[in-house]
Image (tube, rainbow, N blue to C red):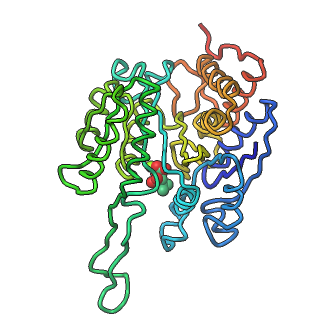
Amino acid sequence: MKIAILPGDGIGTEIVAQAVRVLGVLDLPFELETALVGGVAYEAHGHPLPESTLKLAQAADAVLFGAVGDWKYDTLERALRPEQAILGLRKHLGLFANFRPAICYEQLTHASSLKPELVSGLDILIIRELTGDIYFGQPRGRRESPDGAFKGAPEAFDTMRYSRPEIERIAHVAFQAARMRGKRLTSVDKANVLETFQFWKDIVTEVHAEYPDVVLDHMYVDNAAMQLVRAPKKFDVIVTGNMFGDILSDEAAMLTGSIGMLPSASLNAAGKGLYEPSHGSAPDIAGKNLANPLATILSAAMMLRFSLNQIAAADRIESAVQHVLASGLRTADIWSEGTAKVGTIQMGDAVVAALSGNITKKAIKG
Ligand code: IPM
Ligand code: MG
């Protein structure tokens, strides 16, 4: 089982290091190879996704990714910015189906910004299409000003587009996922305004004919954003396009108390995947041993389950994480009164210890 390890920028290196330690104690025949990606790759090789990194990702059975980006690259030309690395990996590996679960861990109910009764037991899955939409539309750009410069350009444009097969394949993925859960699928669009999303809605409705056991409903994205904070538990699986999915998945993640807890998987048609935490590179807390490594550790569990067929090992990691939370350990992002604040490394230590059978003593008295 070849795994490409791409830590990236900011907190990426710290959180991926903890996930790698966790993989290390599972006693499975992994071959891990690490490469630079994002801003650090740009610094070293002049490109955020160097050829060698892409080759490694292509040759691997799965990719474990940290995070990319830093404000200091905001003035670089777009093609060289760190974000292009993750967009390039999605495109080159054909990772069109992005799974972003939003699960509220019982122990973290009080970390949510919503009332506990609204989020207690929350378990929804956002399926975001990842290789189409306005993110990859053509044409895109800025019209030059009359003197030929982009500065002072009179307009800029990004074309929103989807092809029929792109919508069909994500719809199939979503119906199949819904079938394995609560059998309810909400397709989120903006069909009242955008042609692209009327097309989306029509095709999702067509595909529904093959999944009569799944209940489908359609919701406009503005309403979906509202319903997510009004009554999030009414959702089961949400499927939507690339940009709406980007926005709604951050919103849903925060309902659970911390974006630092949520893993994600991006899969291609062959089931090969890239696994990454749902959060970003958080340059403001990088290198301070503050970041929560659990989203990355849980992403490694998702990788074992979806791409490497190591279900038992995935279960072990997930219960180790549950155990550590139950013992009262919290990184700063999920800390609350009465729990024990720990750093990135100590959280990794605790998960490793729980996996090795060294049951952590309850960190909290009483
Ligand atoms: C995400 C991120 C990326 C996206 C950025 C880093 C390009 O926000 O994975 O949600 O917009 O897809
Ligand atoms: Mg995002």
Q: In this view, does 343 lie to the left or right of 251?
A: right
Residue lying at 39% horizontally and 36% vertically, measured from the top left: 252
Q: Name the residue furthest top.
A: 366
Figure quadrant of the C terminus = top right
- In the rendered view, does 209 fall on the left or right side of 45? left
Residue visible at 60% across and 37% down in the picture: 299
Q: Which residue corresponds to the image point at 25% horizontal and 39% vertical from the top-left?
A: 219
Q: Where residue 193 appears, x then y in whole percent?
A: 19, 54
Identify which residue, 194 or 364, lies in the foreground.
194
Residue 186, compared with residue 337, is above or below; it is: below
Residue 126 in the image: x percent, y percent?
Answer: 42, 37
Q: Which residue is drawn at 33% across and 92% down?
A: 147
Image quadrant where one finds the N terminus: top right
Of residues 26 and 160, the one nearer the viewer is 160
Q: In which image quadrant can residue 253 be found? A: top left
Residue 299 appears in the figure:
yes
Residue reaching furthest to the bottom: 147
Q: Residue furthest front?
A: 210
The image shows residue 124 at horizontal and vertical percentages of 41, 29
Q: In this view, does 292 lie to the left or right of 125?
A: right
| Tally of numbered tags | 0
* x and y, in percent, of residue 27 in the image: 82, 30
Query: 13 left or right of 142?
Result: right
The answer to whether one can see residue 343 in this image is no
When the figure is inspected, residue 323 is found, relative to residue 33, above or below; the finding is above
